[in-house]
Amino acid sequence: MAKIKVPNEVLKGIIAIRDSGLTNMLDRPVVVQLAAEMGYDEVARWIKACPREYAQGVFQGFDGHESD
């Protein structure tokens, strides 16, 4: 399965949250909360706007790209 493409800034934030070990990445509301607390507002917005893609990315992986 293909990785889910996300802007590089979103990927950076997702990795930071994952590496913090503060939550299970499947707990989307907590991930959104941590993103906001850690200053990754773009990550919080993206996860809220794209919950299905976020869930797919947790299982399939994420691939960063330059945002437009």
Image (cartoon, rainbow, N blue to C red):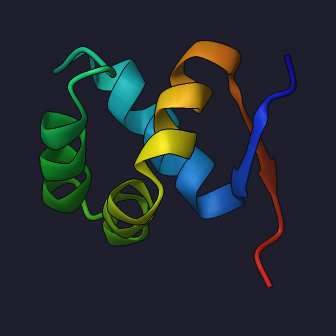
| Percent x, y of residue 6 | 69, 54
Residue at the limit of the structure toward the bottom, as seen here: 68
Relative to the observer, which residue lies in front, 57 or 17?
57
From the viewer's perspective, is 23 left or right of 25? left
- Is 54 above or below relative to 18? below
Relative to the observer, which residue lies in front, 18 or 53?
53
Quarter of the N terminus within the rendering: top right
| Percent x, y of residue 2 | 87, 26
How many labels sit on residues? 0
Relative to the observer, which residue lies in front, 38 or 44?
44
| Percent x, y of residue 67 | 76, 75
- Is 25 above or below relative to 44? above
Tell me where residue 23 sits by quadrant: top left
Quarter of the C terminus within the rendering: bottom right
The residue sitting at 31% across, 20% down in the picture is 26
Residue at the limit of the structure toward the front, as seen here: 52
The residue sitting at 50% across, 33% down in the picture is 15
- Is 39 above or below relative to 24? below
| Percent x, y of residue 47 | 39, 54
The residue sitting at 70% across, 57% down in the picture is 8
From the viewer's perspective, is 15 left or right of 57? left
From the viewer's perspective, is 6 left or right of 47? right
Tell me where residue 31 sits by quadrant: top left
